[in-house]
Every structure is written in structure tokens, then in C-alpha cells.
Image (tube, rainbow, N blue to C red):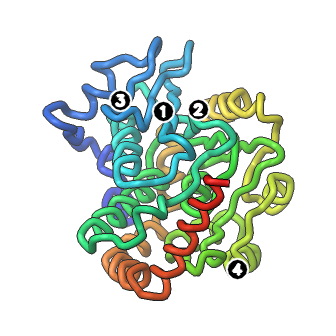
Amino acid sequence: MLSRRLVALTPLAMRGARAPVVGSRPMNKVFGKHAPLSSAAAQDGQGLVKVERLPGDKRMAIINMARAPVNSLNLDLVQHLTQAIQGLEQDPEVQGFILASSQNKVFCAGIDLVMMHQPKADDLATFWSALQTLWYTLYGTRLATVAAIQGAAPAAGCLLAISCDYRVMAKGHSLGMNETKFGLVAPPWFQQTLVSTVGLRHAESLLLKGMMVPSGDALRIGMIDEEVDESEVMLAAEKELGAMLSVSDRARQTTKVALRMPMMQQMKAAFDMDRDWFMSWVQSPEIQAGLGAYLESLKKKKKE
């Protein structure tokens, strides 16, 4: 019975599914064994995501977010991140990857709030479903994952980081789910990912206050696993990924899915209800007014 439940909840790439198609080409021909990434980065058509192999070890890859200036999550970036992960899953040589940022001093700034201001309902629904898919794909991937956090990671940026198996963060930066500071609410799958990382009491306090947690405090409560100088983040991430891959790949994969299966099952079952709630909340006059005021304040700061 357990094995059947594991199969049902395992992302498609773990079950030998065909590679998803991007344009006219299967994803495994874009990112996988038909397009080796050992010497140069492969990237999507818009340059939002760059994927490369670590030199000297075909088992390891790097996914770099590259949407200037702060990797804010719009539909294109979310979809290309999902496709990048699925593409690596289709490559039988790849066993793990590092999720990193090409932008200076920032990991990911969270959801692009411009996109949420006065949105079309269909566009909002499409984006939220895509974000749910990205989380499900990253959190449940068969691959070992390490977040190389070289800068700030608020809100959905924090979600991406804590969805990875291990987190290395640069000293002097912070991460956290700060949605309440903007009158927003972190959805259940954000909340439960944080609970599984730091425990209910810490998660409750952080979520209610919308706190951004400095790297030192994040290490203390288990929100990150390692705190290093900014120049050492990638080196530390590579070292940890190598340690993860030193054990049996099949045993590691099966253990990971078994550990994460209950929450994945619970959250996926509620995705439709979660999307409907999110759309209703974001489109409410109060939230739209708050978003409008915040975006206007950003424009004024740029002019100063």
C-alpha cells in the first residue's frame, strides 16, 4: 500500500514519464542528455533561467534564476523554473542540483506584486496554478536540492529556499514569509513548508509577525543549515550536494518521497480551493488598494 501511495504522489519524472514539451522540442532535448551542459549554460528563450552542469561531476547541476533586477516571480519565471527542474529530472545522469541566483545581493524577491495589481482573473488563476506546480515539483523532486542563498529571500523567495533539502546562506542577509506586513496571507502550503522546517511554534510566530529572519537567527532555529561568507556560498553548496550524493541514490530518493508525501498529498488535494481563495483575497478592494499604495511608494522612491 505504501509503495502505491509513493508512486501516486511522486512527480512524473520520477515515474519514467515522457519529457514535457517546450515549443516543438521535448524538455530532455533542451536540458537533458541530448544537450550536455558541462561547458556552457543552457537557458530558456528569455534568459530567465540558466542551467549548467558542475565541472567534473555530471551528477550535479545548477539552476540560476536570472530575472533582473531581483528575480521577482512572474508567470514566465515560474514556468521556466518548473521546466528546468523537470528537464534535469529527465536526465538519468543528474542526481541533484543547486538552486541559486544570478542577481547580486538577492536570492528571490517573491511574487511580482505588479502582476497582482488590477489583474485579469484568468491571468491570476493561471499564475497561481503555475506557482503551485513549481512548489510541488521542487519540494517533491527525486533530485537532491541545495539552495544557495546569496541574498534576501522574502515571501515566495523564502518558500523556494526552504523547499530545498538543504540551505546555505550568506551572512548578513535575511529570509522569511513577510506577507502579513503587506496585508497578505501566506497560503497553507507556504505555511506548512515553514512548519516542517522550523516547527509549529517558530513558524506561528514568524508568520503572524511577517518577520524577516537574519541569517544568524535563521541558522539557530533551523530555517537554514549553514551560514557562510557570501564568497563561500556556492562552494559550501557544492560540498553539501556532494555529501548528499555519497549515499545510495535510490535509497535517498525513496526516503525523501516517503518523508514529504503526507504534506504533498494534503496540499495538492486543496489546490483548487486554495487558488479560488487566493483570487478572491487578492482581488478584494482592500488588498488592491494596499497594493496600489505600496507600488506607488516604490515609484516615488525611485524618483528620489
Above or below, comparing residue 143 to residue 43 in the picture: below
Asked if one can make out residue 131 in the rendered structure from this viewpoint, the answer is yes
Q: Residue at x 34, y 33 (%)?
A: 44
Nearest-to-viewer mark from 4 and 2: 4
Name the residue that disc number 3 marks. 91
**Quadrant occupied by the C terminus:** bottom right
Q: Locate residue 13: give its quadrant.
A: top left
Q: In x, y percent, where is residue 64?
A: 51, 35
Q: Secondary structure at mark 1?
A: loop
Which label's residue is closer to the chain start, 3 or 4? Answer: 3
Q: Which residue does the numbered mark 2 point to in the structure image? A: 245
Question: Residue 95 — which label?
Answer: 1
Q: Earlier in the sequence, mark 4 or mark 2?
A: 4
Mark earlier in primary sequence (4, 1): 1
Mark 2 residue element: loop
Q: What is the residue that sits farthest to the front in this orientation? A: 304
* Depicted 152 relative to depicted 54: above or below: below
Q: Secondary structure at mark 4?
A: helix
Q: Which of the 4 image quarters holds residue 294?
A: bottom right
Position of residue 183 measured from the top left corner of the image (x, y, whole percent)? 58, 81
The amino acid beneath tag 2 is Leu
Could you give the CA–CA distance between mark 2 and mark 3, rounded to whole angstroms? Answer: 16 Å
In the image, is residue 170 above or below residue 116? above
Q: Marks 1 and 3, Cα distance to the nearest angstrom?
A: 9 Å
| Mark 3–mark 4 distance (CA, rounded to whole Å) | 39 Å
Ranked by sequence position, the earlier of labels 2 and 1 is: 1
Query: Identity of the amino acid at label 1?
Result: Gln
Q: Which residue matches tag 4?
A: 204
Residue 250: image location, x then y, percent: 47, 39
